């Protein structure tokens, strides 16, 4: 009997949720434009639901940072808005989900988000589990040092085994710098956030912080008296948009949208309003990779 | 689950680093904890107050906060914990002697935090000794130190071993935090590494590091059970 009662309750709950959703569609979708997509596609599903869940960083200055407004702000966020707009979904209907580096593949696979725009470097290992649209930006790894330090000029400065460098656990830059140091255990410090690396650099426990140039520029912009860049970018980090591995139609749609934004200026405007404020140069639009 | 075999060396390396920090922290915590326990039961009121204050602070502050103070507070005070670069010891535990201070910072935090619990476990053992024993020793003219050494501590040890073991087991599990405070290559940081940089699924990796911790904690627990049984027989 108990099981039946629970089942009945569940049914009622499901019904009421369903009705609430209908109600939402009736009066809330006014801002959305009427668009038509191929039946059964992700685009149609999202457009019909008038809702999209976007995974992004909440702690990445210039790309996705949640401030006092309670909504994340940054270049990744603007890119997600451009895509949502093309799907006919108003900005207010985007649900932002925090996607820190280590769960990005998981949230896509488990259908917790519809796409991930989170300084997400395209690489082959990740392509085994998910698919990438884009790139929409090409960053590069660089090194930040204390302002008065001229002994580090590039990744090769770590080869003699004396200089210590900090990065974030599990990130691509951390893996890259391990190739340039002599001894990982005595030269590399890994934290879970770049803020801790910055403090360690300031406190002189480490001599350098390395990651993508745009992230470092964010820190330098905040504290120009203490930090500076050492040398030029030494890698290419194409940022892509993560979607489900087999959803080629959605990936193509995002690629089309990105190309449109490159040519109509909305891509450049998104940059100038966000990460561009730190003095990072945008460069020419990257070529999307339709693999 | 292939990650457990493919990346066995990563798990093994992580196990070794975690084992090193646990061995060092256990020794440090037992020594410091014993000192604090003696302070807490000493007949001199100011010393008692110091011991009580120590336990009150370190038992009640979250370990993460203690870690933060060690890893970011000590550098702000200009210390890289270089006093822990003990000659001889640092050739066995290589991480103690590196220029990077984070292994030492994490060790300090673990020791300070765990010592408070060690102190309380020892004190509960002391309290388990019937008061008549200490009174009899005192009436024989034994000093406080002699009293502790010959009468009270040997008896309290029996009652304290099991709670002490539980404290050390908790400490081993607490050591999972050090990977988030700059120690590269311990079990938990290795897991982080495998899942986020190399893209392995989380569950198999979590199972792998759990095995690593269990290898340390289960034998310790079994040993405690045996000690307890033997004690039950001897009584």
Image (cartoon, rainbow, N blue to C red):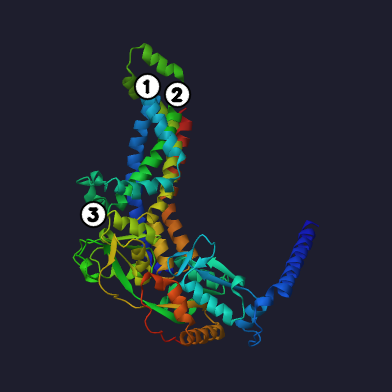
Give x and y (percent) for residue A242: 49, 76
Q: Are marks 3 and 1 in contact (CB under 8 Å)?
A: no
* Residue B222, placed above or below residue A73: above
Residue bearing mark 2: B129
Q: Residues within 10 Å of mark 2 (few under 14, many from 20)?
A: some
Give x and y (percent) for residue B128: 47, 26
Identify the mark at residue A175; answer none if there is no mark. Answer: none
Residue closest to the far right: A1
Residue bearing mark 3: B99
Residue bearing mark 1: B151
Upstream in sequence: badge 2 or badge 1: 2
Q: Nearer the viewer, residue A165 or B178?
A: A165
Looking at the image, which residue is at 47% across and 61% down? B206
Task: Say which element carries label 2.
Answer: loop
Task: Say which element carries label 3.
Answer: loop
Q: Are marks 2 and 1 in contact (CB under 8 Å)?
A: yes
- The quadrant in which residue A42 appears is bottom right
Which is closer to the viewer, label 3 or label 2?
3
Report, in whole angstroms, how far the alpha carbon at label 3 lies from the one at label 1. Answer: 45 Å
């Amino acid at each position: 009997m108990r099981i039946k009662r629970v089942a009945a309750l569940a049914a009622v709950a499901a019904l009421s949720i369903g009705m609430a959703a209908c109600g939402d569609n009736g009066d809330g979708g006014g801002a959305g434009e009427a668009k038509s997509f191929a039946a059964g596609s992700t685009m149609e599903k999202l457009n019909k639901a008038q809702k999209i869940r976007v995974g992004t960083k909440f702690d990445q200055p210039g790309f996705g940072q949640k401030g006092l407004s309670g909504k994340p702000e940054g270049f990744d966020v603007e890119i997600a808005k451009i895509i949502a707009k093309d799907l006919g979904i108003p900005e207010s209907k985007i649900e932002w989900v925090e996607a820190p580096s280590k769960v990005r593949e998981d949230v896509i696979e488990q259908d917790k988000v519809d796409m991930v725009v989170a300084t997400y470097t395209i690489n082959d290992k990740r392509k085994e589990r998910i698919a990438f649209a884009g790139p929409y930006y090409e960053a590069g790894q660089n090194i930040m040092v204390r302002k008065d330090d001229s002994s580090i000029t590039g990744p090769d400065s770590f080869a003699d085994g004396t200089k210590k460098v900090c990065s974030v656990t599990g990130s691509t830059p951390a893996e890259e710098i391990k190739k340039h140091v002599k001894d990982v255990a005595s030269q590399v410090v890994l934290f879970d956030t770049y803020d801790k690396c910055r403090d360690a650099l300031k406190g002189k426990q480490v001599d350098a912080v390395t990651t993508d140039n745009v992230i470092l520029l964010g820190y330098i912009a905040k504290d120009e008296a203490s930090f500076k860049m050492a040398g030029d970018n030494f890698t290419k980090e194409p940022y892509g948009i993560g979607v489900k591995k087999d959803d080629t139609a959605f990936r193509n749609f995002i690629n089309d949208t990105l190309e449109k934004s490159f040519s109509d200026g909305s891509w450049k405007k998104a940059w100038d309003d966000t990460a561009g404020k730190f003095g990072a140069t945008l460069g020419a639009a990257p070529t999307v990779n339709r693999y | 689950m292939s990650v457990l075999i493919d990346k066995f060396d990563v798990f093994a390396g992580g196990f070794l680093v975690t084992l090193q920090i646990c061995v060092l922290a256990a020794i440090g915590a037992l020594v410091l904890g014993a000192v604090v326990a003696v302070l807490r039961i000493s007949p001199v009121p100011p010393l008692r107050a110091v011991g009580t204050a120590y336990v009150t602070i370190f038992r009640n502050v979250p370990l993460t906060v203690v870690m933060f103070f060690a890893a970011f507070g000590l550098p702000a005070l200009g210390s890289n914990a270089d006093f822990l670069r003990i000659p001889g010891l640092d050739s066995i535990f290589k991480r103690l002697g590196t220029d990077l201070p984070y292994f030492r910072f994490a060790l300090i935090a673990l020791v300070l935090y765990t010592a408070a619990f060690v102190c309380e476990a020892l004190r509960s053992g002391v309290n388990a000794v019937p008061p008549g024993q200490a009174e009899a020793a005192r009436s024989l003219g034994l000093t406080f130190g002699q009293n502790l050494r010959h009468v009270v501590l040997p008896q309290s040890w029996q009652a304290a071993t099991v709670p002490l073991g539980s404290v050390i087991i908790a400490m081993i599990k607490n050591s999972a935090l050090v990977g988030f405070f700059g120690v590269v290559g311990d079990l938990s940081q290795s897991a982080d590494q495998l899942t986020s940089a190399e893209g392995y699924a989380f569950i198999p990796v979590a199972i792998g590091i759990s095995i690593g911790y269990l290898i340390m904690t289960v034998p310790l627990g079994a040993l405690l059970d045996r000690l307890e049984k033997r004690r039950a027989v001897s009584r």
